[in-house]
Amino acid sequence: MINELIEKIQHAAAHSQTLAMSGSGSKAFYGGELHGITFDVAAHRGIVDYTPTELVLTARSGTPLVEIEQLLSEHNQMLAFEPPHFGPYATLGGCVASGLSGPRRPYSGAVRDFVLGVGMLDGRGQHLKFGGQVMKNVAGYDVSRLMTGSLGTLGVLLDVSLKVLPLPATALSLRFACDQQAAIQRMNSWSRQALPLSATCWENGQLTIRMEGTQRAIQAAHGKLGGELVANDMAFWRDIREQRAAFFLSPLPLWRLSVPSTAAALKPEGPQLIEWGGALRWLYSDSSPGEIRNAAAAAGGQATLFRGGDKRCGVFHPLPSALLAIQRRIKHNFDPHGIFNPCRLFHEF
Amino acid sequence: MNADFLDLLRATLPKHAMLIEPEDLHPYECDGLSAYRQLPLAVCLPETEAQAQQILKLCYRHAVPVVARGAGTGLSGGALPLSHGVILSLARFKQIIAIDAEARTARLQPGVRNLAISEAAAQYGLYYAPDPSSQIACTIGGNVAENSGGVHCLKYGLTVHNLLRLRVITIEGEILEIGNAALDSAGYDLLALLTGSEGMLAVITEVTVKLLAKPERAQVILAAFDDVQKAGQAVGDIISAGIIPAGLEMMDTLAIQAAEDFVHAGYPRDAAAILLCELDGLNEEVSEQMLQLHDILQSSGATSLRTAVDEAERLKFWAGRKAAFPAVGRLSPDYYCMDGTIPRRKLPDVLQRISELSAEYGLRVANVFHAGDGNLHPLILYDANIPGELERTEEFGGKILELCVAAGGTITGEHGVGIEKIDQMCSQFTAPELALFHGIKQAWDETRLLNPGKAVPELHRCAELGAMHVHGGQLKHPELPRF
Ligand SMILES: Cc1cc2nc3c(=O)[nH]c(=O)nc-3n(C[C@H](O)[C@H](O)[C@H](O)COP(=O)(O)OP(=O)(O)OC[C@H]3O[C@@H](n4cnc5c(N)ncnc54)[C@H](O)[C@@H]3O)c2cc1C
């Protein structure tokens, strides 16, 4: 299997073809349009190694996320970054390449925080390994994290080792009626109080939070905060994570604004949903990209055109030229012939 | 050329910001790995970012290598000077620029000491989680450059997990902002790439870190074992029970005794191993998990269990662990600290093999272990004044690292490669992997002036080592230049 992939890469390199990386295609909507010959890695699948006491799992990149999550839950463990699937067959490779994390991200960390090592093919068809299956590793540059979120532009992920965590003993979600500004203030001030928060979401006058930990701790925190208990909260958080909640049904372009958690309510017209303790703002708006990006930048953050809209404006927040130049040179180092997912990250490469 | 260059350098800096006399250069001749020493051409101690930028531009124009330096506590020779190079010390960048309590972030100059961050954040009920044992001295810039860890990494992560933003200067003198005050930013994760890059890619002039709320309660338990294997097993048992301790550290007899004699932490001198296991969180959570932890440790065969009765005793238990290196240093004229990481389940085999090697080489070893994350610090005791002993120590150390790699681990968990483990990089990585590393460096520093010769070995060096393996079966050839 790996040899076939290598041959395809070398063929593409020799014939100036471009390759469009694909797992299950669940995140094809995200990032610049895919161009080129479909390069399917979904068949390279299977969990390679998992020893629960090591808190490490290694799997091939085509392995479905559901298969990994199923096995982990049998051992009372989880992917703590709660990856969105965006489709029934979402693969580990797509999860790591897109770098997207779910509701627990500000409290436990992002995908990149849990990636320990990768096996990959570069644009010369070389099989390379970085990082490993241990928690701490500073030998060489951190290529594993560089690959995370690179949207398949640097190479083909073959396998990934991830740190996993125990499932929390219990979870409980609470709801509070409040406006946007009050929600932002509460989410930040609760984070200053060592509460066992594990997810936060504000939309349409309602702030919902999740706490996780031991039974008595959660009860104690509930006592402190009050709020109304949310029934069936697993479904609530899943629908936020998978963007199946009613908020996400709008036909307008969906923007993802990553801002400092304390940023005041953002101006652009359109419905907003806030996650990550205030650090992530989803916005449906057909305001001009420039206006939205300026608003994000003025708040100290960035805006991504997440779904829909006109991608010609660039999906990701533009970089200053000196940074773009470094990114381009890094891309060239991994993929000298420019065959992997051209223009998926930035128009320039 | 040197004289010219030095004149130009002198012209860009205030008088007291530049050292060139040998007696002034001596304090900079090594870092925490004192076996390697070298005087630099000059030491620059800029006070402003603009000065640092001027120095870099000048060095770039004159092709003079630059080695950035924080507090010089690094243990792998990362800040070791180059004879024809300049040391760029960030020691005067000591300002805590701002603490945003509401957003739980701190903006720091790179020379701020690690401990000073938590001290300044304490008034807001916040702290900075990564706590290397060297935290009273080491700088946040050095921490970023090494991706340093501490005794609380298992739960709170390494430096890379606690960073938001860096401001850096490239060798060409360009100032870049990497990351921002939000949780993610567009493009490749350069924040992660710079973390642990050992001063090879850019010079850090500002660091924004995340601060965390102080846990409501922290409680530490000291468990003694009559057998190292049992202690290792207990670590797995704790994790299996679904507990992620804030800290989980292990020490063996020699380390226990050294620490006890040095700081009187209250450790049992006769134990074969101790585990220090700290739980933190809400009061109720800690109470519940403490009960569980007691049961687990008892059934794993702990011979005694002591819970710190108050904050003072808790700090005393940790003081013993944090002083382990200097404590072991008192047992012998010199010690050599290793930093391999292994899958935890391999611990018994690896410790067994280390003690066999210790007997073979006739050199004592004290083991200090970040047990939670599988990061071993065997400390080899030696005397540099005995001819040949340093070489034997290094050879022994090299074997330990190769052992870690063979066990599925790595040659360095947190101290970095520097100059020390440059040869072992050849056994951990293949030539194409090393070539990719060189390409990454060149994406930032095309003419290779930032800390050249460190962290990533030249391919020909590995080839020569490989050849030596075949011919002599011996790793170290002192007659070869190291860089
Ligand atoms: C007793 C003792 C205990 C220790 N315990 C631990 C521990 O528990 N965990 C751990 O991880 N480490 C530990 N260390 C190692 C060391 O303290 C860390 O590596 C620390 O982060 C180094 O910081 P420093 O300021 O001393 O950096 P230095 O030693 O001055 O430099 C280290 C490296 O960083 C580069 N550098 C420094 N500043 C900058 C900058 N501003 N920009 C770019 N590059 C820069 C240097 O070029 C060099 O390569 C210990 C060391 C000692 C002596």
Image: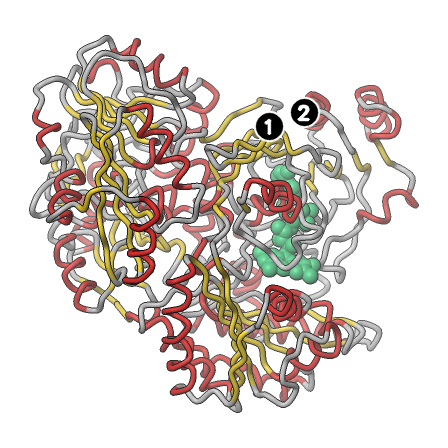
The answer to whether any part of residue B136 appears in the image is yes
| Residue found at x 77% / y 40% | B84
Instruction: Give the residue type that dot 2 points to.
Output: Glu
Q: Pointer 2: residues within 10 angstroms few (<14), some, or many (20+)?
A: some
Position of residue B329 measured from the top left corner of the image (x, y, whole percent): 75, 71
Residue denoted by label 2 = B49
Position of residue B432 measured from the top left corner of the image (x, y, whole percent): 41, 50
| Residue found at x 65% / y 53% | B135
| Residue found at x 39% / y 17% | A297
Position of residue B59 measured from the top left corner of the image (x, y, whole percent): 71, 28
Q: Cβ–Cβ below 8 Å for labels 1 and 2?
A: yes
Label 1 marks a residue whose chain is B
Q: Is residue B235 above or below residue B17?
A: below
The secondary element bearing badge 2 is classed as helix
Position of residue B293 measured from the top left corner of the image (x, y, whole percent): 40, 75
Residue denoted by label 1 = B169
Instruction: Give the residue type that dot 1 points to.
Output: Ile
Which quadrant, please, contains the C terminus of chain A? top left
